[in-house]
Amino acid sequence: MRRISWFNATSLTLGFAFLYIPMLVLVIYSFNANKLVTVWAGFSTRWYGELFRNEAFLDAAWVTLRVALVSSTLATVLGTAAAYVLVRGGKFYGRTLFSGMLYAPLVMPDVILGLSLLLLFISIGLDRGMMTIVLAHTTFSMAFVAVVVTSRLVAFDRSLEEAARDLGCTRWDAFRSVTLPIISPAVISGWLLGFTLSLDDLVIASFTSGPSATTLPIKIFSAVRLGVSPEINALSAILIGIVTVGVITTSLISKRAIMKRIAEENRADT
């Protein structure tokens, strides 16, 4: 194995420090006993208890979680289908327009996308709430899922599908039994990306949300404008912990699936 140079080691250390030290400081100060978040007054879990008694934050967190689950699932289904059409559909009338419309949310500013969706919902008479947030998040998350799945389908060995078809599988059975299990790491990655984008979104949700549904980023942004409270630190620490556990778990599952597939391919070769 090649030894890492001092320049690369220093760059990585500074980069990771720049990214993660502020998060570490936030987590530490979430256990601060003082109401002033910048003055340490001893260790305490008081603000976690206050957070779980704050119904406004809990309601916003529940709305955000439901929106993220539904929108990421819809975006995964639609994005995977769109990627399959682009890669396997060949040349068809309107392909360029379809591809451009699919990838447009990737480069479209969030303000423009949120405003256009707001005008659309108003024009069709749809009241802003949880449904409009789900539709908005599905719209831009689908593009990211399509990019991830497309990159996997391009490198996919189509002879595996052809072998399944020769053995009597229909096109759908070949996709369900052969293609989908192989591209599942990309599909799962797309779902996680859509879930993360939905949890993190503030701009688009601010245009498409209503009084009946407020997401957690909007609630936090509204509260921070009046000053950072220890409850927000506690909430942020919980979110960091959930994301960390989710990323580690997903990485382990994906690695296990890849190792299993490599082992099966080696057995097939022998």
Image (cartoon, rainbow, N blue to C red):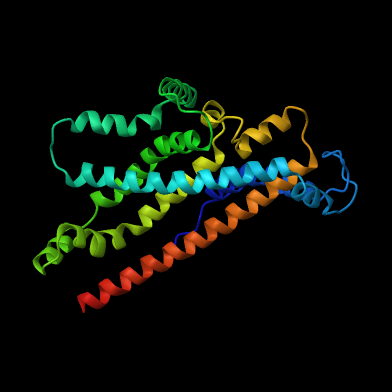
Instruction: Tell me the quarter of the picture where residue 35 sits.
Output: top right
- Along the line of sight, which residue is nearer the eye, 209 or 96? 209
Q: Is 83 on the left or on the right of 140, as rendered?
A: left
Measured as percent of width and height from the top left, residue 57 is found at 70, 42
Measured as percent of width and height from the top left, residue 133 is found at 50, 35
- Residue for point 79% across, 42% down: 230
Q: Quadrant of the C terminus?
A: bottom left
Measured as percent of width and height from the top left, residue 167 is found at 11, 69
Instruction: Tell me the quarter of the picture where residue 222 sits.
Output: top right
Q: Quadrant of the N terminus?
A: bottom left
Measured as percent of width and height from the top left, residue 258 is found at 37, 65
Q: Is residue 21 visible?
A: no
Q: Is 25 on the left or on the right of 115, as rendered?
A: right
- Residue for point 57% across, 32% down: 202
Q: Is 58 on the left or on the right of 154, as rendered?
A: right
- Along the line of sight, which residue is nearer the eye, 141 or 240? 141
- Residue for point 44% across, 20% down: 119
Q: Residue furthest left?
A: 166
- Along the line of sight, which residue is nearer the eye, 181 or 118? 118
Q: Is residue 230 visible?
A: yes
